[in-house]
Amino acid sequence: MKKLASLVLLGCIALTGCEDADEAKKDAAEAKEEVKQAVNDAWKDVKEATSEFNDDSLQALLAESKEMGLSMYDNGKEIAIDAWIESKEAAGELSEKTKQKAKELAEELKAAREKLEQEKN
């Protein structure tokens, strides 16, 4: 009797599980359709908004933006070239200063050696 009751209980649990699985599948399918519809609606709204804004004023704005971008590019290029030239000049000045300092140090070392040589003699 206990075995029969256990078997009936297992059957009920299995059937309940199957029913729950079927409901879960149905719920998932419904949710998938809702999401699909929401995406389609959003895409439709985007297309409509694009059509509304794609007029002469938008084209003029885009052309003006392009012109400004090119102008900024040209100005930036000029500034970069000027900065490069200035840095090269500054590097040249620095190089000259470095050479002068090295020459001075070499002269000081030579004088110090000569002094040591004189002191030894």
Image (cartoon, helix red, strand yellow):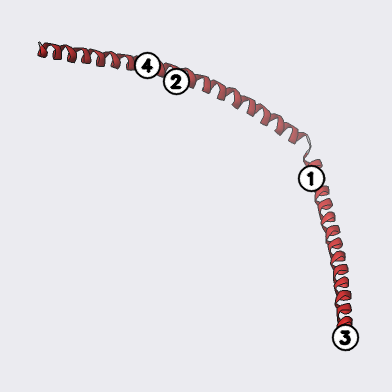
Residue occupying the point 33% across, 17% down: 98
Q: Nearer the viewer, mark 3 or mark 2?
A: 3
Q: Are marks 4 and 1 in contact (CB under 8 Å)?
A: no
Quadrant the N terminus occupies: bottom right
Distance of label 4 from label 1 (alpha carbons): 62 Å
Would you name the residue on which mark 2 appears?
A: 87
- Other-residue count near label 3 (Cα within 10 Å), few / some / many at <14 / 14–19 / ≥20: few
Instruction: Calculate the distance from the C-alpha at mark 3 to the C-alpha at mark 1.
Output: 65 Å
Read off the residue under disc 1: 49
Quick one: 50 or 11, which is closer to the camera?
Answer: 11
The secondary structure type at the circle numbered 4 is helix
Q: Which circle's residue, 4 or 2, is located before the other in the chain?
A: 2
What residue did someone put label 4 on? Answer: 95
For this view, does 28 lie left or right of residue 91? right
Label ID, residue 5: 3
Sequence order check, earlier mark of 3 and 1: 3
Q: CA distance from mark 3 to mark 2?
A: 94 Å
Kind of residue sitting beneath label 2: Ser
Question: In this image, 68 relative to 6: left or right?
Answer: left
Q: Estimate the x, y position of residue 21 in percent, counting from the top left.
A: 85, 68
The three-letter amino acid code for the residue at tag 1 is Ala
**Measured from the top left, where is residue 54 in percent x and y?**
78, 38
Of the image marks 1 and 2, the number of the one nearer the N terminus: 1
Q: Secondary structure at mark 1?
A: helix
Q: For the image shown, how many numbered marks are present on the structure?
A: 4
